Amino acid sequence: MNAGAGPAACARPRPAWLVWTVWEAGTVKTRHVGNNWVPMLGLSFLFLVSLAISMVAEKGNGADARFFVAGAIVVGALSAAWLWKHPSWWLAPRNHYLYLAGGTGLGIVLFALIPFLNGAGPWLAIGAAVAVYGRFEQLRLLVTVGGAVAVTGFLAAVIHVDVLGGAMHLVAVGALAFAANKLYVLRHGRRRESQDSDPGFIGSFEEFDPNEPQSPLSRTPR
């Protein structure tokens, strides 16, 4: 395999324990899709605060678009700083991620200006961005969670009923927190010390030592 070849160029699947690293300015950065747990946790916190604002100011009807715009900028900046030091797999071309970042920012601002979306326009843009990002990283978890967030945002936008927006916020918070937890477990493991995986290993969210003794009841039938 050539030194400049990316993960998609590998014909053979690589073992789960392989550490895929990139050298930059004399430092080693470990690429892993599980590093996205921090951005997902940040988005979960964003929706949680939006839930509180919506219930107090709007009686749970829709969302506060201005808060979403400001909060998305903060979470986006912090997530970019985190992923700069703890990169994901970056399977898609670099320009794709730049277009996604620019399109998401523009969509959040423009959708916030549409009055009939009930303040949930930025919500829709964030959900769609997570789903597209998951498609770039070839991780079904992010695609599913992003789609769920977008659907809850659509329901909050078109159904103007008290408390419904708050309920949709809760669903979005739960989906994003679930994704953050799964990605954290994928990155750091749960039953043994930290392991690194490459794009050839997307199967189980938990990694187990095949030599670890197991009870007969815990063994998976073959």
Image (cartoon, grey):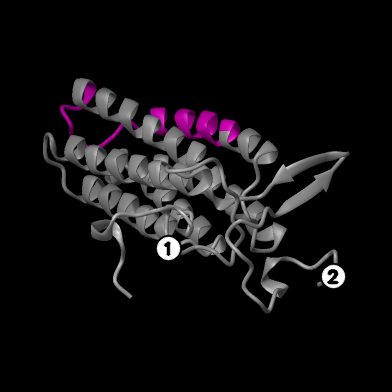
As for residue 61 lying within the magenta part, the answer is yes
What residue sits 44% from the left and 53% below the top?
212
Above or below for 183 versus 3: above
User: Is residue 186 found left or right of 58 in the rendered image?
Assistant: right
Is any part of residue 113 visible from this angle?
Answer: no
* Residue 29 location (% of width, % of height): 73, 43
Amino acid identity at mark 1: Arg
* Residue 182 location (% of width, % of height): 40, 47
Distance from Cα at disc 1 to Cα at disc 2? 28 Å
What residue sits 69% from the left and 66% below the top?
7
Circle 2 sits in a helix, a strand or a loop, which is it? loop
**Residue at numbered disc 1:** 140
* Residue 199 location (% of width, % of height): 59, 63
Chain part drawn in magenta = 57-78
Which of 130/115 is in front? 130
Locate the N terminus and report the quarter of the image it occupies: bottom right
Is any part of residue 23 visible from this angle?
Answer: yes
* Figure label count: 2
Amino acid identity at mark 2: Asn
In the picture as drawn, the residue positioned furthest to the top comes out as: 56
User: Is residue 79 found left or right of 18 in the rendered image?
Assistant: left
Which of 79/217 is in front? 217
* Residue 203 location (% of width, % of height): 45, 64
User: Is residue 207 found left or right of 171 in the rendered image?
Assistant: right
What residue sits 55% from the left and 36% below the top?
76
Q: Quadrant of residue 43?
A: top left
In the picture as drawn, the residue positioned furthest to the bottom comes out as: 11
As for residue 50 lying within the magenta part, the answer is no
**Residue at numbered disc 2:** 2
In the picture as drawn, the residue positioned furthest to the right comes out as: 26
Does the magenta stretch mainly form a helix, a strand or a loop? helix
